Image (cartoon, rainbow, N blue to C red):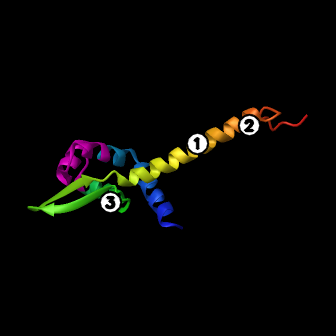
C-alpha cells in the first residue's frame, strides 16, 4: 500500500464519522482546548479522546499541552488528498458516462 493510499484511507475513515466531522467544524473557529470541544459536542472528555486519536492519526488535528490544558488545532491538509481523489474519480466517472451515451447502443448492456 502506498503512503498516499494509506493517508487517503486514514482521512476517509476519520471523516466517515459525523462526530469527527463536527469536531473539525468546531475547530474552524481556531485552536480550542479538549474540554471546550467536549462541552461543544456534549461528550465527556474520555469519549472525545477516542475521536481525537482517529483524527490525529489521519493528520487532521494536532494536539499540544499548554498550562495543563490539551489544546487542539485542525489541519485541513489531509482533506486535500481526499478532495483530489474524489475530483479525479468524479471526472473519470463523468467521462465514462459520456462515452456510454455516445456508444451505438446508447450505453445499454441489454442484448436483443
Q: In the image, is residue 16 above or below residue 62?
A: above
**Left or right, 89 with reference to 52:** right
Q: In the image, is residue 65 above or below residue 93?
A: below
Q: Is residue 28 inside the magenta stretch?
A: yes
Residues shaded magenta: 24-45
The label on residue 91 is 1
Decide which of tag 1 and tag 3 comes sooner along the chain. 3
Which residue is at 73% across, 37% downward?
A: 100
Q: Quadrant of residue 39?
A: top left
- Quick check: marks 2 and 1 in contact, CB under 8 Å? no
> Real-space Cα distance between discs 1 and 3?
30 Å
Our reading of the magenta stretch's main secondary structure is helix
Q: What is the secondary structure assignment of the residue under circle 2? A: helix
The residue indicated by pointer 2 is: 100
Q: What is the secondary structure assignment of the residue under circle 1? A: helix
Which residue is at 55% across, 47% downward?
A: 88
Which residue is at 65% across, 40% downward?
A: 95
Q: Is residue 32 inside the magenta stretch?
A: yes
Please provide percent x and percent y for residue 90.
56, 42
Please provide percent x and percent y for residue 18.
38, 44
Which residue is at 50% across, 61% downward?
A: 5
The residue indicated by pointer 3 is: 56
> Real-space Cα distance between discs 2 and 1?
14 Å
- Quadrant placement of the C terminus: top right
Graded by Cα atoms within 10 Å as few (under 14), some (14 to 19) or many (20 or more), the crowding at tag 2 reads some
Please provide percent x and percent y for residue 1.
54, 67
Graded by Cα atoms within 10 Å as few (under 14), some (14 to 19) or many (20 or more), the crowding at tag 3 reads some
Amino acid at each position: 500500500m502506498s503512503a498516499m493510499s494509506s493517508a487517503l484511507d486514514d482521512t476517509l475513515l476519520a471523516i466517515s464519522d459525523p462526530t469527527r466531522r463536527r469536531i473539525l467544524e468546531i475547530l474552524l473557529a481556531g485552536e480550542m482546548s479538549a474540554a471546550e470541544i467536549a462541552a461543544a459536542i456534549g461528550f465527556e472528555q474520555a469519549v472525545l479522546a477516542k475521536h481525537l486519536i482517529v483524527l490525529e492519526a489521519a493528520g487532521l488535528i494536532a494536539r499540544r499541552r499548554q498550562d495543563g490544558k490539551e489544546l487542539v488545532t485542525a489541519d485541513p491538509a489531509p482533506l486535500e488528498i481526499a478532495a483530489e481523489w474524489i475530483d479525479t474519480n468524479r471526472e473519470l466517472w463523468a467521462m465514462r458516462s459520456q462515452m456510454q451515451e455516445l456508444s451505438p447502443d446508447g450505453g445499454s448492456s441489454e442484448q436483443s
